[in-house]
Image: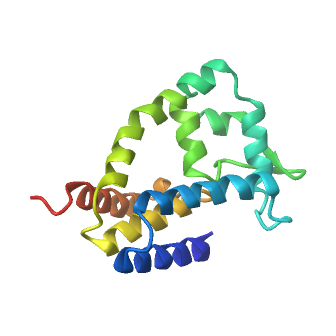
Amino acid sequence: MGIGSLVAGVVYYLNAKFNLVKKWQMYLASIVAMVTVYFTGLSGADSGRFEIWNKVFDKVDLSHFLLGKGAGWFADQRITLGTNTIVIQEHSNFITFFNLFGIFGIILVLPIFLKFLKEKDDHSIFSSILFIAFCNSYGHFSLHQSTTAIIIIVTAAICLAGGKK
């Protein structure tokens, strides 16, 4: 996941420098790739993540879908991988966010994300860092690590400010 995210970030950076496609097209392509990989599988290279995600999705009901289940819900489920491994993280920031806040949480964050997609990339390195974090969030839980979360938050603030003070 980390190496794939780094490669995606380098591609994003080069795209930002040479202005080949628009920012929203890069994000849309990555989202399509993420969904496609989930539904087509990785022949076991997913390290069991897809099995975990399937077990999460099996537990989703209407209230979960709309409002989420809050912090600690996933760990309380005692989802197992294999015969005796209890999984304590979803291994996806996106699924963690969905479990916490449901679709309403996603709807609340969507305008900020769309604003970012519309902004010009004045700081290619910072927007590349955010793209790496976005791609890495697919299969990791980077925001659970405080130093990484701080880097992502500061980088997002720089990108959303668009060079303004």
Task: In this rendered view, identify the residue nearer to me: 103 or 53.
Answer: 103
Q: In the image, is 2 to the left or to the right of 144?
A: right
Residue 127 in percent (x, y) is at 35, 66
Residue 40 in percent (x, y) is at 81, 56
Q: In the image, is 40 to the left or to the right of 112?
A: right
Residue visible at 57% across and 60% down? Answer: 29
Task: Tell me the quadrant of the picture where the C terminus can be found.
Answer: bottom left
Task: In this rendered view, identify the residue nearer to me: 30 or 87.
Answer: 30
Q: In the image, is 43 to the left or to the right of 73?
A: right
Task: In this rendered view, identify the residue nearer to me: 82 or 124.
Answer: 124
Residue visible at 72% across and 38% down? Answer: 56
* Residue 58 against residue 33 in the figure, above or below: above
Find the residue positioned furthest to the left: 165
Q: In the image, is 104 to the left or to the right of 126?
A: right
* Residue 112 against residue 64 in the figure, above or below: below
Task: Tell me the quadrant of the picture where the N terminus can be found.
Answer: bottom right
Residue 10 in percent (x, y) is at 47, 79
Q: Quadrant of residue 23?
A: bottom left
Residue visible at 28% across and 56% down? Answer: 119
Find the residue positioned furthest to the front: 20
Task: In this rendered view, identify the residue nearer to me: 83 or 23.
Answer: 23
Residue 161 in percent (x, y) is at 20, 56
Find the residue positioned furthest to the right: 83
Residue 70 in sight from this viewpoint: no
Residue visible at 67% across and 34% down? Answer: 76
